[in-house]
Image (tube, rainbow, N blue to C red):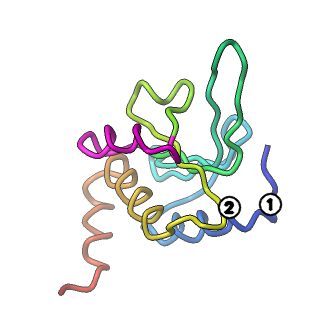
Amino acid sequence: MFDEDDPLLARVRAIAFALPDAAEKISHGHPAFFTTKVFAYYGGSIRRDGEWISHRYSVVVLADGQERPALVQDPRCYVPAYLGPSGWIGLDLDQDTDWQEVTELLETSYRLTAGPRRVARLDAARPRP
């Protein structure tokens, strides 16, 4: 369901692995990034009119409740099957992807799932303005 040589996956991995204690496993055929809980998947799908539609080149994250409504309206985003009702959102990736946005989405999802000690480590590692 994914190609190890995919350059978009390599970018997502680099961002995810920069977060404290992040690891990767394969879940339902997709790379999943986690600490204790999964904070991102690479690739997702939706079900429309009884048909499965793959979003092979995408990142699926747990969205902040205040940001999610705007993301749902964004044409680059989709509500993934199974995870969508729990607040997850998918963002399609391509050569024009804003990687700063991907970084922010991954970090937000991490913050929502990683626990207070890991979040404190993430905050401590950031330079102060």
Query: Image check: 88 left or right of 43?
Result: left
Residue beneath the point at 40% across and 28% down:
86
Say whether residue 72 is magenta.
yes
Residue 70 to residue 21: above or below: above
Residue 83 to residue 120: above or below: above
Residue 79 to residue 37: above or below: above
Q: Amino acid at mark 1?
A: Glu
Q: Which residue is mark 2?
A: 9
Foreground of the two, 19 or 62: 62
Mark 1 is surrounded, within 10 Å at the Cα level, by few (under 14), some (14 to 19) or many (20 or more) other residues, namely few
Q: Tell me how far mark 2 sits from mark 1, CA to CA.
A: 8 Å
Screen quadrant of the N terminus: top right
Label number found at residue 4: 1
Q: How many marks?
A: 2
Residue 50 to residue 34: above or below: above
Which numbered disc flags the more N-terminal residue, 2 or 1?
A: 1
Q: Residue furthest top?
A: 50
Tell me the magenta residue range: 63-77
Say whether residue 62 is magenta.
no
Q: Tell me if label 2 and label 1 are in contact, CB under 8 Å.
A: yes
Mark 2 is surrounded, within 10 Å at the Cα level, by few (under 14), some (14 to 19) or many (20 or more) other residues, namely many
Q: Quadrant of residue 110?
A: bottom left
